[in-house]
Amino acid sequence: MGTLSKYFYEATRDKTCRDMLHPGCTCYEAGKIYIRQGVLGAMKHYLPGAATALLFRMNHWDDPEVWRSCVVQYVRCIVAGLPMTVGSFHFFCGFYNLLGRFSATFFVFLPSLLGACTCMFLPRSIVRAQGIGLFNMYIEFLIKRSRGRTMEMLRTSRLAGTLLFSAFSAAMMPALQYLQIDRFWFANVYKTSPSPQNPSKTHCTHHKGKSCLQHITLQIKRSFYFGLAIFLIKNIVPRLLLPFKQPTKFLRLMVSRFDYGLIGFFVGYKALYEICNCMLIRNNITTNPLVRASIAGFASGAAYCLYPNYMLFTYPITELIEVYWLVYMRSNLPKPGLARVVDRLPTALLAYAFSLGMMYHLRVVYPYYTNRYCHKLMDNGTSGRSETLARGYAEIMMGYRS
Ligand SMILES: [Zn+2]
Ligand SMILES: [Zn+2]
């Protein structure tokens, strides 16, 4: 962070915010544009979430209350999301005018602080998703930026990525099995731990009344539909009118964009997990459900090779931290006072606050190391303003503009 601020300061010493962020208009004019673009950006950014929520309540569409609460929620998101979509640009100009120079710290710190204040008004699920998502992007940045031959090898090798993901998965499954909680992961643990004592010839205890084959097929089907639903939400919501206006173009687009990798990963993970689990039980290999979960978890991690990417890779890292914290809190291990304080901290909120300004800063200063999704998110949210800033900054750094 120290060196980052130094470069940021040096590169921007004799530049004004007009050079970098809003060529051709004054700060006041730009400020008004930011707000308009920010509101529009936020409307676009939160629309998929709002549409999905409404879709889930399809059966209650005749109830005006459902529509009202959905609209209220949507407006709340737009307003509380403003620090993410406009805040930092106002700070950028504001601090330039106040201090007469750019300050990387303020560019990072204040949007974060404001984001933290307003994100209390965002629905918890959104804060969680965005906080963890942004934090994962920060981990991705750290991985992409780390130097050294070993890191280089680990970063580019699909085998190494898959083995590491398998290791994460082998750690995750027994923790979920131990906690018996309902948490999003690519395979589910069974509430009643299957007892291996008297496995009947054809049935395991965790799928009574079905053969292993029937059980595994059912689970695979569920994962397939889940992957399909994600693909559809991702691809249809941004272009809701296209299927009505140009159905053939829409179909062509859906076929060309079909996410084989992602759906393959969901299906492969679940299939490997269920097959391993049943095999371990039927052959009476181990009686300990935690060991079984770990072995099956390791095997199913192999599905990562179908969809190797940073978003998937960083997801278990933050999940493991959270889940193992829960394991520790539930265990009989001694818990000093500090642990209780940490336990009460709103982690998702803090992750959101920390990562928000950080990702803004990194997006501008290190565009090549930051996640493409982050670029898209910010471009959407700021109606392209972040792109202008990043380009302005790059041009000044490279000496194209003096
Ligand atoms: Zn300005
Ligand atoms: Zn079975």
Image (cartoon, rainbow, N blue to C red):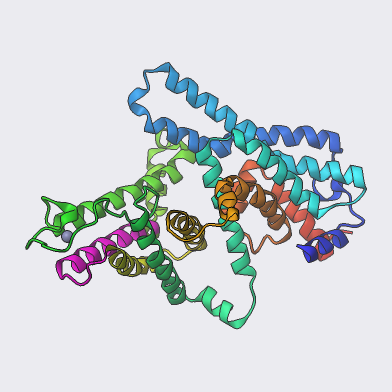
Residue nearer the viewer, 127 or 152: 127
Q: Is residue 299 left or right of residue 16?
A: left
Asked if the magenta segment contains residue 129, the reply would be no
Residue nearer the viewer, 332 or 293: 332
Residue drawn at point x = 70 percent, y = 62 percent: 366
Q: How many marks?
A: 0
Q: Is residue 258 above or below residue 349?
A: below
Q: Is residue 260 visible?
A: yes
Q: Is residue 306 visible?
A: no
Q: Position of residue 68 (x, y in %)?
A: 49, 20
Residue nearer the viewer, 385 or 55: 55
Residue lying at the far left in this picture: please name it. 201
Q: Main secondary structure of the magenta part?
A: helix
Q: Position of residue 23 (x, y in %)?
A: 83, 45
Residue drawn at point x = 69 percent, y = 58 percent: 362
Asked if the magenta segment contains residue 268, the reply would be yes
Q: Position of residue 24 (x, y in %)?
A: 84, 42
Q: Is residue 165 above or below residue 323?
A: below
**Magenta span:** 262-288
